[in-house]
Image (cartoon, rainbow, N blue to C red):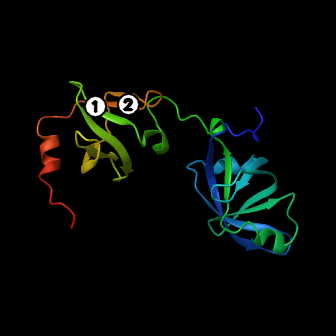
Amino acid sequence: MDESAGDVSWVAIARILRPRGRRGEVVADVLTDFPERFATLRRAWVQRQDEKPRPVEIAKAWWHQQRLILHFAEISSISDAEQLRGWALVIPLRERLSLGENRYYVSDLIGCEVIERGGRSLGHVSGVEPTGGVDLLRIDLSSPGGRQTDELTVPFAREICPEIDVQARRIVIDPPEGLLELNRDRPTKQ
């Protein structure tokens, strides 16, 4: 597939912070849960906000003080590297690493409709809160008119979320008795 075509979806794996050194290297914050991918990654794209990504060849990547250092073959000076400050290092979505069964990317969960086992739609996933244990799905509750009225959190556990279909953008939940009411009794943020 031609990555220059407009039908490719992209995912950011690093954010370029600033130049480093005299030969055009850059310091980057890693945005992927798989930092080991940089050991073999040789082709990627750089993208500024909503602009079209530009291909780059990664000549070298290494770690220095918990930060990723990248040297692109096309960049050979501090001033060229400075132009990349704030840009994202992206790859086509189809090149994401496979997570395996019953594991999901947060970005795939955001926007999924959440439906109670009986068929009642509660709203859509607006975020995922890590807790150190079972993560929590944040669900924007919708009023009959379609506007958001409140938020609900539900543990993202197989017992409560038995059906997850990110392709259909749907999560079916089977909450234990009282869970939804417990959420609604929380004090609201002012």
Q: Are marks 1 and 2 in contact (CB under 8 Å)?
A: yes
Query: Left or right of 40: which side holds 22?
Result: right
**From what the image shows, is residue 2 above or below residue 23?**
above
Query: Left or right of 190: which side holds 73?
Result: right
Task: Tell me which corner region of the image, top left, top right, bottom left or bottom right, holds residue 18.
Answer: bottom right
Q: Nearer the viewer, residue 133 or 186?
A: 186
Q: Secondary structure at mark 2?
A: strand
Which residue is identified by label 1?
A: 115
Three-letter residue code for mark 2: Arg
Q: Identify the residue at horizontal 28%, vertical 48% (top origin).
A: 148
| Residue 133 image offset from top left, x and y in percent | 33, 48
Task: Tell me which corner region of the image, top left, top right, bottom left or bottom right, holds residue 160.
Answer: top left
Which residue is identified by label 2?
A: 170
**From what the image shows, is residue 88 above or below residue 161?**
below
| Residue 126 image offset from top left, x and y in percent | 37, 48
Three-letter residue code for mark 1: Ile
Q: Identify the residue at horizontal 11%, vertical 40% (top origin).
A: 178
| Residue 15 image offset from top left, x and y in percent | 63, 61
C-alpha separation, residue under disc 1 versus residue under disc 2 = 7 Å
**From what the image shows, is residue 135 above or below residue 99?**
below
Characterize the local packing of mark 1: few (<14), some (14-19) or many (20 or more) Cα atoms within 10 angstroms.
some
Q: Identify the residue at horizontal 12%, vertical 44% (top origin).
A: 181
Query: Left or right of 84: which side holds 176?
Result: left
**From what the image shows, is residue 91 above or below residue 80?**
above
**Label 1 vs 2, first from the N-terminus:** 1
Q: Quadrant of the C terminus?
A: bottom left
Q: Quadrant of the N terminus?
A: top right
Q: Secondary structure at mark 1?
A: strand
Q: Which mark is residue 73?
A: none
| Residue 27 image offset from top left, x and y in percent | 70, 67
